[in-house]
Image (tube, coloured by chain):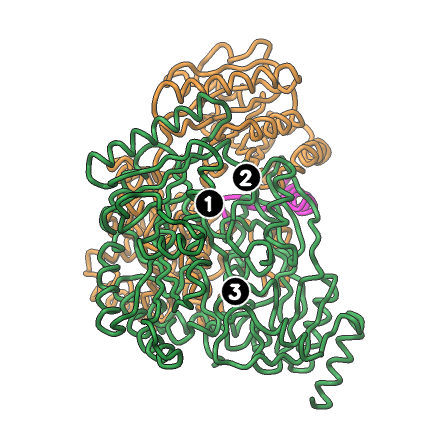
Chain colours: A orange, B green
Amino acid sequence: VSGAADDLVEVLAGIVGAAAVLTASDDLAYYGSDRCRGGWPVAPRCIVLPRTVEQVQAVVSACAAAGAAIVPSGGRTGLVGAATATAGEVVVSLERMHRILEVDATGLTLRCEAGVTVEAVQRAAAEVGLMYPVDFAAKGTAQIGGSIATNAGGVRVLRYGSTRAWVLGLDVVVASGELLQLGGALVKDNTGYDLRQLFVGSEGTLGIVVGAVLRLCPPPAATVVALCAVPDEARLLDLFAHVRGGGVTCSAFECFDAGALRAVLAHKRLASGPFNPPSPQHALVEFEVAAPGDAMLQAVQDRVAELLADAHEDGLVSDAALAGTPQQARDLWSLREDVSESLHRHRPHKSDVTLPIARLAEFVPAWRELVAARLPGAVPVIFGHIGDGNLHLNLLAPPDEDPAAWHARCEAFDAEAYALVGRFAGSVSAEHGIGLLKREHLHHTRSAAQVELMRAIKRALDPRGLFNPGKIFAPA
Amino acid sequence: VSGAADDLVEVLAGIVGAAAVLTASDDLAYYGSDRCRGGWPVAPRCIVLPRTVEQVQAVVSACAAAGAAIVPSGGRTGLVGAATATAGEVVVSLERMHRILEVDATGLTLRCEAGVTVEAVQRAAAEVGLMYPVDFAAKGTAQIGGSIATNAGGVRVLRYGSTRAWVLGLDVVVASGELLQLGGALVKDNTGYDLRQLFVGSEGTLGIVVGAVLRLCPPPAATVVALCAVPDEARLLDLFAHVRGGGVTCSAFECFDAGALRAVLAHKRLASGPFNPPSPQHALVEFEVAAPGDAMLQAVQDRVAELLADAHEDGLVSDAALAGTPQQARDLWSLREDVSESLHRHRPHKSDVTLPIARLAEFVPAWRELVAARLPGAVPVIFGHIGDGNLHLNLLAPPDEDPAAWHARCEAFDAEAYALVGRFAGSVSAEHGIGLLKREHLHHTRSAAQVELMRAIKRALDPRGLFNPGKIFAPA
């Protein structure tokens, strides 16, 4: 550690208190990385834990004066290395700024600090009979600031959109140390460039989100859940079109294939699956009941049963299970939700991509062909948010494959697979972001002109490269 | 006209054909301005009417080479002068690029050129049983490109959001002449900064929108419409909270006061209004029925009747009319929708602001007080999209007031009124934008640091100030 570094640590301790600047090696390791384990080092200079917006501003100014880069840090549940400090950066963790400041049940807004977890926001909304509909597995750990910086998606994007759609106001500390208060609790505000949306999804490269005003909404009165056995991917998309045009509100349309179900059944130690004979593909479909009352619920249930009967007649589904109780609904959902965890022990090689929905049926066979040609013996397992065009493509190594060799083969495969995604006008990252992990693949989704424009914006907002250097694109 | 200008006109004629470059004075006047008549001149150099993206790119490059500024131009229904050419700019009208290129009924997307009208998009969606939900009075003339550049709002923002929420993909020609194809038909795409959202609402200052992929949605199966007589503004907000928490989907919550109703009745030559005695305030409320079928419709109607009965018991409404037929629903809607046209002959001084919904009840009396103190004799008329916190504040001149004096008094009043909006954390422009008209009031909603950041972005994307100079903020 250089003398200059020591000086900065002292300056930072003077701002936040000595107990709120961490330099012990286990703290550096714990706070220095997100959930993505790439080949890069985890090497922050120190961890700073401010408690107020003013402290964040002072920390940013001190780092700017010292020429020290900053990694803004939330719950670190990200999967692309966007919150990892690789080269002596100061990690500014928002975890001690976790207050819910105001819930407005008429305006349907909630104001909070950046370090509050997504789950705590959901709970605070539920306490007044409302809902924060962004929902994903890591919500108990993920913080609102990080979910905004990464534009988190999840299981109900089909119905409610990503985090971007729920951010009304945003408080951000920028490179000058100034606090920008963008938007406030306003639904409509056409006064120049939407700077809010520029920060949403910027992965901490333009400033530090310190607070937000979020939109809330009334929850549905009830939901109706069905699991469908579907013969193949083309009919999965036909079923989606059928269901979407069916006059009931579809809040989720998720898919998982036979391999994914086998993994879940093994993980849960269940002898048999929901369908006999087993189905190549499954659609987990959720519908919303807008208003309370048995009549309303019954009307939606009847309509869904009708839709499924029609789909069966048309050969889109070979079998279907309609949940009759909340417990049955949870059981059906768990077959989909547990896929990721069930695959974990197989250490799958993962990929998170979106395709235009109309091209999914073409893309999947092309991807399978590529797998067969380049990774013979590998087992492809596909699940995802098919209603959003978002597939999680997993590859399980052939038995007895050497881990290092497998990793190298997967890296080579990725270059071709992401190029395929690009050829189908898809995106190399649906919801996980770019971070460090996908930087080299960004060009398949973003043209050189677009990347240059992003760099120009980065230079305009952060001319000295203070915030999260090297994330999304290499420093110029 | 200078020789250089003549040269440029020739170059442009070489690109788009001589018949697609207009220089006659009536063409310059017609294409040179939007619907806002400010004190500024209308003085374009020429009007260019390209038919292809390649022509737009060549026109931009030619203008850049000649150092000639460009005003991108759509249907010119704007109300703040954002599409007005005041100083010899080249107006690039997209009106000849009006093709709908693709409608995808499964992916719920529509791809079109920028010059297609909003109404034509709505029709194309309806042809496949879908809906483009952005809806506003000027839709038959307003073009999609302009609606994106201004982030158009309208009557169903409460339920569906502004244009921003419906733009999936955006094709933009930027200052280098390059075409950026942003997003495509993807619901999820977390690959760096959201450049799309930066262009949405940028009022033509960063590039020319030449095409878009829009999201569509299924229309509601039916709607239920009620008109409520409400004693005062505070109870209007209580009613909004009551209705919003009522478990039915509220798709519009609009308001108009007694003065607005009087103007509509006079305009329509109706002897009496919907309520006796007349009510100080009215709420026009629309609810959606999510699924088809009489049972569903009946359930929503019953629930709405219950909600209104409870509201009556609690003193929130003194009377209410529930439409029993589609014609009755249209009649009730027209009392709200015709307000603006009915006021027109009184030449009201207008203002379009948003407040946080929770502060509306405080703001309105403060604004009324300011009117009484500064503009004695003026008649305030308030209507608007109260569910969005968006009020249209109108002032009718006292009888026999000199028009010039009235205009001057209103200008002085505006400075104070917008400052009041700022103190209540509101926005000086809810949906109309800033353009030339509200430039001087921008600082009430946007801090100096925010405006400086917008300028920095403008410089980064358009370093030579090619696009729409002087709109939103004065050139640096």
Q: Which residue is tagged 3? A: B78
The percent position of residue B264, horizontal first and vertical second, equals: 41, 54
Query: Residue at image x 66%, y 81%?
Result: B45
Q: Which residues are magenta?
A: A408-433
On screen, residue A330 above or below B260: above
- The disc, 1 or 2, on the residue closer to the chain's N-terminal end is 1
Q: CA distance from mark 1 to mark 2?
A: 10 Å
Q: Which residue is tagged 2? A: B217
Query: Residue at image x 58%, y 18%?
Result: A229
Is residue A210 visible to the viewer in this orientation of the structure?
A: no
Q: Secondary structure at mark 3?
A: loop
**In the image as oriented, which residue stretches furthest toward the front?**
B271
Q: Quadrant of residue B420?
A: bottom left
Position of B88 with respect to A71 (left or right) is right
Three-letter amino acid code at the position of disc 3: Gly
On screen, residue B169 above or below A1: above
Chain at numbered mark 3: B
Query: Residue at image x 39%, y 24%?
Result: B299
Q: Secondary structure at mark 1?
A: helix
Kindly identify which numbered label has been placed on residue B160. Answer: 1
